[in-house]
Amino acid sequence: MVETTEEKINIEVSSDGLPEEFPMDPKTAVEAIDEILSYAAYMRASDVHCDPRREDSIVRFRVDGRIGEVGIIPKRLHDEVIARLKILSGSRTDVHAVPQDGRWRTELRSDEYNIRISFMPTYHGENAVIRLLPSQTSRDLSFANLGFTPDHVRSIDKAMKNTNGLILVSGPTGSGKTTTLHTCLSLKVREPLSIVTLEDPVEYEIPGVRQVHIRHNHGVTFSNGLRSALRQDPDVIMVGEIRDNETAKVAVHTALTGHLVLSTLHTNSAIEAIPRLVDMGVDNYLLASTLRLIIAQRLVRTMCHGCFSEGCDLCRNSGYVGRSVIAEVCEIDAEMRELISNRASTSVLYENAKVNRFCPIAEDGMEKVEWGITTRSEVFRVLNI
C-alpha cells in the first residue's frame, strides 16, 4: 500500500483482483482525471466512483460487475476534480445542491469512449459516478460475442424479421439489456428503414438512427416521446424501458399499428413479462396479437483461460476476464398467443414454453459451466440460487 500524502492518490489492495498499486502521482485535477480514466480503461472498468468522505474521497472501479476500492483522493483535490469533471461534461460549476448529469467523448488508450457522468450532493460533498461506454466503432455487436447460443440467435433473428410487433428484453439493472437491444437494432440499420430510439440516457451512438434522450425535467417522457416518435414516420422504434401503465399501452398499440417495437422490462424471467404487462393495463387479446419474443438475461463473469481461475496478470488475479450473457428466449407462437388471450396462468405459460424447446436461464447457465465459459458459483451468485 502506498503511503498517503497530500498530493498523491493512495491505493488500497482490492479483494476483487485489482492491482495493489495504482500507477498515479497527480499534481493537479487534470492529471488525476486523465490518469484515473486511463487506468479505468486499462482495467476494463464500466464505472468509476468518486465518493467523498470526511477527510478524503474514495475511488472505486466496477470491473465485470464487481466493485472494488482502488484509491484515495485528498479532500482538496476531490473538490478540484469535481469542478474539472463538470467543465468536461458541460455541467454547471456553480450548482452544488442539486443532482446534475453530463457527458463528453474522449480517447482512452487508443479507443474512443463516450463518457457519461452523474453528480449527486452528499453529506460530505459532491459524489461523481462516471460510466465508460466504448464507442460503436470499438464494439463488435453480435449475439454470439455477447454469449447467446445458436438457438437463441435463430429465435432472435426470426423475430427481428417481423415488420411489426413487440420484442422485449427483461432483467435487472446492469444485466446488459440495452446492449442486447442495440445488437438487435444493428440487424435493422442495414435495411432501408426509419428507426427511432427513446433512451434514458442515450448510451451508444448508432449511425443512421434518430436517438432521443428522455428528459423528464423538460416533460419528455417515454410515453409522450413515443407518441411524438409516431409522427416521425418510423418503421422501428426502440423504447428504452416500459416503466408505467401509459407507456405499456402506447407501446402495444404502436406495435399493433404496423411498427416493430423493442423495449425492456424489469422482470425476473421471460414468462413473467406477460402477467407484468397485463398488470400494467394491457388487454390480453392485444398482448397476444403483438408479442413476438421475450428475452430474459443476466451477465456472468467468464473464466480466465490464461490461468483457469488460479489467477494471473491477464485477469488481475481475479480468475475472470469479461462477462457473458446467460439467457432464456421465449418465442410467442400460435399456441402461446391463444393461452395469453385466454388469460392462462404463469405456470401454464411456462409449461407450454418448455414443451416448445424453451430453455430456462438456469439451464443455460449450467451449459456454460459445462462448456468452461463460467463457474457454477458465478451462475448461482447471479441467479441468487
Image (cartoon, rainbow, N blue to C red):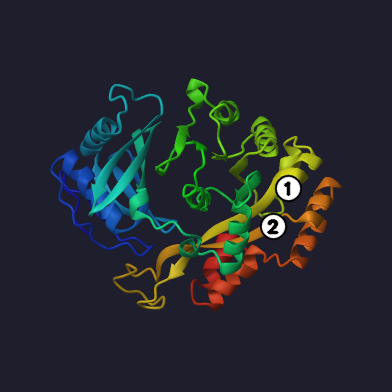
Disc tally is 2
Label 1 and label 2: CA atoms lie apart by 12 Å
Q: Is residue 94 visible?
A: yes
- The percent position of residue 14, horizontal first and vertical second, equals 34, 60
Q: Within the image, what quadrant is residue 302 found in?
A: bottom left
Q: Nearer the viewer, residue 296 or 31?
A: 296
Res. 274 mark: 1
Left or right? Give the position of 289 relative to 181.
right
- The percent position of residue 355, horizontal first and vertical second, equals 78, 67
Q: Nearer the viewer, residue 319 or 142?
A: 142
Which residue is at a point 33% across and 22% down the rendered structure image?
95
- Given the current orientation, which residue lies at the most extreme front position? 192
Task: For marks 1 and 2, give the one nearer the viewer.
Answer: 2
Name the secondary structure under disc 1: helix
Image height check: is 8 above or below 375?
above
Res. 331 mark: 2
Q: Nearer the viewer, residue 303 or 273?
A: 273
- The percent position of residue 51, horizontal first and vertical second, equals 35, 41
Image height check: is 306 above or below 135?
below
